[in-house]
Image (spheres, rainbow, N blue to C red):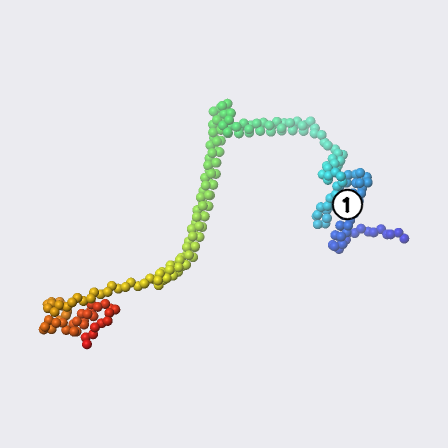
């Protein structure tokens, strides 16, 4: 019995479909190569995979050359409509209008650049002056607008920098106060306290020194100073670090 005809259907299994595509693509490229070699034919093969990947094959000549040849052969049999005389006249008129417009625009541009103004009349010169004044006003207005916007941006940036400086100053002040206090404490601990100057020692007591009314010391009948008065006088004049005399 002969082999029955196999019905071609889409393979539902994704893996099997990918394997079949790879095998059939290889076989298709092999067949294209065989027909190109055996029959000396120009063959171009383009295949896109289900994921959009491109596979191509071309015989001895390049793919671009074969495609150009295909385009020439495809459009060779199409009828090319020849334009009528009316359409040709309309195109010629439109072309002449465009040429005149281009000439007028070029001449106006030369006038704006200060060229070929000798042949202009007073009215044309006045119109040209008005155009230049208008252009100058627009240019200055645009320049002033850009300068104002630039100044506003700079002021905004300056304000942001001031705010940032203020925040950084607030964060840095407590730390500076603490460091200054620590530094002062360290200097105070290293410094030595100043020494007090010694009190002057009492001078020699004269036995015959007369007592004045404001004198606090009192003497006896012989002109001598008693022990209590000497003790008080000595304790008053001696410095604090020397031993005190008692009245005993």
- Residue, x 24% and y 71% (percent of image)? 243
The residue singled out by tag 1 in the image is 29
In the rendering, at what x and y percent does residue 23 appear? 77, 50
Which residue is farthest right? 1
In the rendering, at what x and y percent does residue 135 appear? 48, 33
- Towards the viewer: 116 or 229: 229
Few, some or many residues within 10 Å of mark 1 (<14, 14–19, 20+): some
Q: Viewed as shown, does residue 200 lie left or right of 134?
A: left
Q: Viewed as shown, does residue 135 lie left or right of 234?
A: right
Is residue 211 something that shows in the picture? no
Question: Which image quarter: residue 226?
Answer: bottom left
The number of callouts visible is 1
- Residue, x 78% and y 45% (percent of image)? 30
- Residue, x 76% and y 48% (percent of image)? 25
- Residue, x 77% and y 48% (percent of image)? 26
Residue 192 vs 62, above or below: the answer is below
In the rendering, at what x and y percent does residue 44 appear? 75, 41
Quarter placement of the C terminus:
bottom left
Is residue 187 something that shows in the picture? yes
In the rendering, at what x and y percent does residue 72 appear? 74, 35
- Towards the viewer: 8 or 227: 227
Which residue is farthest top? 119
- Towards the viewer: 214 or 176: 214
Q: Viewed as shown, does residue 114 lie left or right of 17?
A: left
| Element assignment for label 1 | helix
Which residue is farthest left? 221
Residue 227 vs 47, above or below: the answer is below
């Amino acid at each position: 019995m002969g082999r029955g005809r196999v019905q071609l259907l889409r393979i539902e299994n994704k893996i099997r479909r990918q394997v079949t595509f790879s095998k059939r693509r290889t076989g298709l490229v092999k067949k294209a190569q065989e027909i190109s070699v055996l029959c000396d034919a120009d063959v171009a093969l383009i295949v896109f995979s289900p994921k959009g990947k491109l596979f191509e094959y071309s015989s001895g000549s390049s793919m671009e050359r074969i495609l150009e040849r295909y385009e020439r052969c495809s459009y060779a049999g199409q009828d090319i409509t020849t334009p009528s005389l009316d359409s040709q006249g309309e195109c010629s008129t439109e072309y002449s209008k465009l040429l005149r417009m281009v000439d007028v625009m070029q001449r106006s541009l030369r006038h704006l650049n200060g060229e070929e103004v000798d042949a202009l009349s007073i009215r044309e010169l006045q119109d040209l002056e008005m155009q230049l004044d208008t252009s100058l006003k627009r240019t200055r207005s645009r320049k002033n607008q850009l300068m104002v916007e630039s100044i506003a941006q700079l002021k905004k940036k300056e304000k942001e920098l001031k705010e940032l400086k203020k925040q950084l100053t607030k964060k840095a002040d407590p730390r500076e106060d603490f460091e200054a206090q620590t530094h002062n404490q360290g200097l105070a601990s290293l410094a030595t306290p100043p020494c007090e100057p010694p009190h002057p020692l009492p001078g020699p007591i004269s036995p015959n020194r007369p007592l004045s009314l404001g004198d606090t010391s009192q003497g006896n009948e012989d002109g001598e100073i008693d022990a209590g008065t000497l003790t008080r006088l000595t304790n008053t004049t001696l410095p604090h670090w020397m031993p005190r005399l008692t009245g005993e």
